[in-house]
Amino acid sequence: MGFSVLDSISMGSHVLVKICHERTLKIQSFWARERPTISFKLSRSRPYPHPGRLISCKSELVDFDERTSPNEVRKEIERCYELIHRLGRGVVYLGSSRMGPDHSHYLQALELGREIANLLECTSWTGAGPGLMDAATKGALQAGKPVGGFKIGKEAGEWTASNFHPYLPSEVYLTCRFFSARKHGLVDAAVRSCSSDRTAVVALPGGIGTLDEIFEILALIQLERIGSELPVPFLLMNYDSFYSKLLGFLDDCEDWGTLSKGEITSLWKVCDSNSEALAYLADFYKLPPPTDKAQHDNELQSASGTFS
């Protein structure tokens, strides 16, 4: 028996390594036009690695037994669901981990997180990482509302430790080993289980990871895997026209016929500002407009002070 592993070399070419009962190890480039092959003999005095493990060139131990174990993934998904059950469903924020407090989008995301938490009075969920995820978390905390998160090791930015958050208590976030489990958690946290649930997905500006999450959730909505009975509002925050070129590409998809006319606009709401997002959510859930709600809360607080 043998196994195959994909790896990469410094020039960027990918190689296939096959270790079998044979004593010859062959490395072949997939990308080089002449497809050169390098062969060399393995020393008989050195044992083979554990069949489920490979030591990479960076001296990192990759445990394939654990990574491919369905039981390990299932257990982590269950932990995600348990955290959601304990903290409650709510608004899920997707966004860049690289835009820090000095970025204008960070300040906008912080304000949005605070105002949505006040409007919907629900738990705010993020990837529990730095950048815009941090902004949305801080905004919800400023509103005095609960927060939860599904963290992944090695987020871009300074929080690279596998189980670390600078200010959130460990009981409100879960550090996931598997992206699949994390995605299950982020999706389930936004799925409405009853009509009284106020949830949403808010896509802030972001990169590859954010786009991955955006289109996965869009596909689930498109295929009516989520939101078919109780729709979930999906907001794309187009701060400073951040997503305008992407929206243009999706328009081109309609012209090419890979999307039906108007299909993408039925799946989400594109918002250029926080006020537009708040007005949309208030209308979606039949709530007083944010300004009216704030005035109403102030009146209640004043009346409470008078009666006391």
Image (cartoon, rainbow, N blue to C red):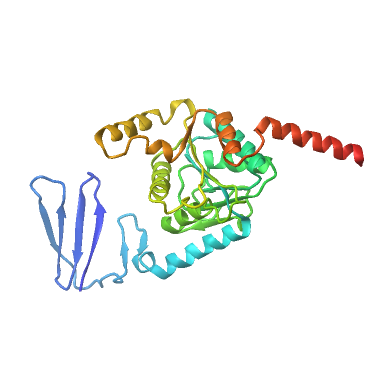
Q: Is residue 29 above or below residue 62?
A: above
Q: Quadrant of the N terminus?
A: bottom left
Residue in the foreground of this view, choosing between 115 and 47: 115
Residue for point 38% across, 41% down: 208
Q: Quick one: 113 or 260, which is closer to the camera?
A: 260
Dividing the picture into quadrants, the one containing residue 279 is top right
Pinpoint residue 236: horizontal percent, then vertical percent.
Answer: 47, 36
Front-lying residue, 275 or 225: 225
Q: Is residue 38 left or right of residue 185?
A: left
Total numbered labels: 0
Q: Is residue 87 left or right of residue 47?
A: right
Res 116 quadrant in image: top right
Residue in the image at 40% along x and 28% along y:
244
Residue 79 visible at all: yes
Name the residue at 32% across, 32% down. Answer: 249
Instruction: Please say whether residue 131 is visible from this viewpoint.
Output: no
- The spot of residue 8 in percent (x, y) is 25, 51
Percent position of residue 202, x then y: 51, 41
Most distant residue in the top direction: 240
Residue 108 position, x and y percent, is: 57, 31
- The image quadrant where one finds the C terminus is top right
Residue at the left extreme, as displayed: 34
Q: In which image quadrant can residue 294 be found?
A: top right
Nearer to the camera, 156 or 122: 122
